[in-house]
Image (cartoon, rainbow, N blue to C red):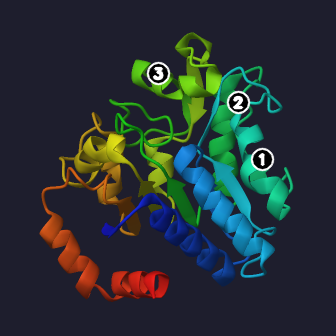
Amino acid sequence: MKIIILPDAHSVCGLAADIIAQTIRQKPEAVLGLATGRTMEAIYAGLCERHRTGQVDVASITSFNLDEYVGLPKNHPQSYRHYMREKLFDSVGVPEIRGHVPCGDALNPDQEAASYDQAIAEAGGIDLQLLGLGGNGHIGFNEPLSGFRTRTRVVALAEATLAQNSGMFEGDPDQVPKCAITMGVGTILEAKSILLVATGAAKAEAVAGSIEGPLSSVVPGSAVQMHQECLVLLDEQAASGLKRRASIEWQMKHDPELSHLIGQYCS
């Protein structure tokens, strides 16, 4: 795991968009694992701008989203399918057949989850998995106590997640679907590379637990410590709970990959 800390969320999201764009330039038909949430909006806006200005052609990618609410049809305004169309797919021309999101209103959600996991394998696996981090340490909708070998499956959402996501449902946690289909931790860890992005003071505790804490299903994000190609991008607020800051800054300065990324973006 390698870590970059930048001054603010704008810088973090800009670098994340650059890294994804570079992945696509190197492999135009890359298979990307995508995430949703407020942090991701700025990343997708940056990717759309790079597509619009000819810096990268995003239209040929195949993507698999991490999760979807059980019970929501794809045209529901709070579905993640709708989110992806609005924030990325429609702007860059990714057709629905290649922009995969679990079917939230599938008649058999368990079968949908198994089929989704199989579809990822049939696509050759994920080249780059974009991850956010929940305030309780979840990745995807793998809530605390999710095993590290779990596959794509139906999960019950934690009370903290319902409260956090209620802003999308008129501020009412009771309106948030209680279950979701999510890639499992084991599925996520099979990606060839992982890009984890966290911004804001509300993520500081989860960031510290994921990066410096023990490997534990209590903090599902800690599973990324086991991945050989994981890059973590943080702003100062999200990094505020880290205790090994000096070691991270030394790595940022002397690791050739990190110093190149930082220099390329900040120059």
Distance from Cα at disc 3 to Cα at disc 2? 15 Å
Q: Where is residue 170 in the image (x, y as percent from the top left)?
A: 63, 19
Q: In this view, does 203 lie above or below 77?
A: below
Left or right of 105, for residue 142:
left
In the foreground, 49 or 28:
49
In the foreground, 113 or 54:
54
Q: Residue 260 occupies which quadrant of the picture?
A: bottom left
Please say if the residues under marks 3 and 2 sit with CB atoms less than 8 Å apart: no
Amino acid residing under circle 2: Gln
| Residue 127 visible here | yes
- Could you say whether the residue bearing mark 1 is in a helix, strand or loop? helix
Q: Residue furthest top?
A: 174
**Which corner quadrant holds the N terminus?**
bottom left
Left or right of 58, for residue 143:
left
Q: Where is residue 201 in the image (x, y as percent from the top left)?
A: 32, 45
Residue at which label 1 appears: 86
In the foreground, 196 or 111:
196
**Total tally of numbered discs in the picture:** 3
Q: In this view, does 95 lie above or below 179?
A: below
Amino acid residing under circle 3: Ala
Residue at which label 3 appears: 163
Q: Residue 124 occupies which quadrant of the picture?
A: bottom right
User: Residue drawn 72% across and 51% down?
Assistant: 87
User: Residue drawn 75% across and 40% down?
Assistant: 81
Residue at which label 2 appears: 78
Q: Is residue 84 above or below residue 173?
A: below
Distance from Cα at disc 3 to Cα at disc 1? 24 Å
User: Residue drawn 46% across and 65% down?
Assistant: 12
Q: Position of residue 211 (x, y in %)?
A: 25, 54
- Could you say whether the residue bearing mark 3 is in a helix, strand or loop? helix
